[in-house]
Image (tube, grey):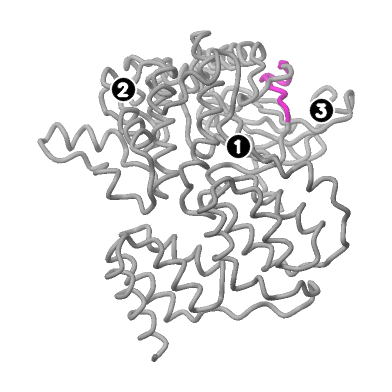
Amino acid sequence: MSMTYHHALPAGTRIESYEVNHVLGVGGFGVTYKAYDHTLQREVAMKEYLPTGLAIRTPDGTTVTPKSENDVENYEYGLKRFLDEARTLAKFREPHIVRVLRYLEAHGTAYFIMDYEDGEPLGKRLKRTGTLGEKETLAVMVPILRSLRSVHEQKFLHRDIKPANIYIREDGSPVLLDFGAARLALGEQSRAMTGMVTPGYAPFEQYFSRGKQGPWTDLYGIGATMYHCLTGIAPVASTERVAAIQDGETDPIGDLTKLINRNYGESLLRAIKWMLEPNAKDRPQSVQQVLEALGVGDRSAPGQDTPVTVDYEPTQKLEQMADTGTTWKPEVLKTVEVNLERHIGPLSKALVRKAAQKTSNVDELTELLAQFIPSQQDKTAFLQRTQIIRSKEAAPVTAPPPAQLDDDVLRRAEKSLASYLGPMAKILVKKAARSTADLEEFCRILSEELPNEKQKRAFRRAIEKAKGH
């Protein structure tokens, strides 16, 4: 169910041929709706300019007006920049940049009309999975970088890159949303807008109206987002980092290699560290430099896109298979999906759903899905992780829910794991508990996150003690 926003347009409101359905998101400078285009008979996303610090909705329910005479100049300046942003974005046809179909002025304000995409924000995915592997991270961020390169070539910046503004479509491809030109313009024009940045993702220069911004500004946001993908948490705010460094203290962002619990390539870690340099001059100055640092700089020319992704050759075979009509337990499919997502990323949900239609038991399902994993080592790991359910046949949806691990086990697991991995322990324990209710499988999944056998044995003893073994 969608939330109610009292300052948003109510469902059923018509703006020309566009009928508002519900709110998709709300920010300090606008509201984005899901709407229906009655002319083209298709769903669209519609973004309305409504800076809550400067404007209000009048009693007629649609018109937007400045709060006072003192706000008129700033409101109109922001509206102009909002339309400038729309005109600029409408020129781009990049596959991973939100596409503006048209823009219009009405009811004292303005609107973008954009493609509507099914899927979920990267931020929501990270809340569910905790972290992403290297292939998953690159599969999201490299296409975004390549499309962003074309935007930068037109002297245009995003200025608010973060997981919440990267959307993962149903087919697994990413798209960058919500360009922030209007917000920055208002920040420069009015002190009332100071502080409208996202801590953790905004570089130091964005906190000041005279801070020199350029591609390096967006690249800090890219680096911060990749940092979140690897560690499960946002970086420390750039203002805190600069303050600490100026006081002669250690950069509170710490050593990236000590915050992660997976094996990542050196080039990826170096590139992220480079993008997160506090001083703008010390960061990469162009997207091309980042792509080269990641080792993918020569794979596509500017304006083109060659996404980093897995080669899914079995897709055609899957499409040709007949549906079996089998009914599956939701928890079985969810367990398979979570395990598969470690190896192929966002496409796992769609693949599991499709493969489940073509198979009649767990053995067939996991063997079929394993074909989509390119690495033999990863394929073996996937089959091992799903061993706990592979012997179970599909059962009706009405079957009772599986047993859950008791709270004492979860608390002890989190406490023990935290001594090695810190704050990441809470995320990992929750994720493992969602994957399985079997204690042995639970212990095995979590112990894989530890780097040596001594720590693994100590962790297992702590869990066994919780069960009175």
| Residue 104 sits inside the magenta stretch | yes
Q: Secondary structure at mark 3?
A: strand
Q: Main SS type for the magenta part?
A: strand
Query: In this rendering, does residue 402 appear at all?
Result: yes
Give the residue displayed 29% in from the left and 69% down from the top.
455
Give the residue displayed 34% in from the left and 41% down from the top.
235
**Image quarter in which the C terminus is found:** bottom left
In the image, the segment drawn in magenta is: 103-115
| Image depth: mark 2 or mark 1 in front | 2
Residue 283 is tagged as: 2
Image position, residue 12 (x, y; %) = 82, 38
Residue found at the very far top of the displayed protein: 154
| Residue 368 sits inside the magenta stretch | no
Amino acid carrying label 2: it is Arg
Residue 18 is tagged as: 3
Query: Is there CB contact under 8 Å for labels 3 and 2?
Result: no
Indicate which disc, 3 or 2, sits on the residue closer to the N terminus.
Answer: 3
| Image depth: mark 3 or mark 1 in front | 1
Image position, residue 7 (x, y; %) = 64, 38
Residue 167 is tagged as: 1
Left or right placement of residue 358 versus residue 298 in this view: right
Q: Is residue 310 above or below residue 392?
A: above
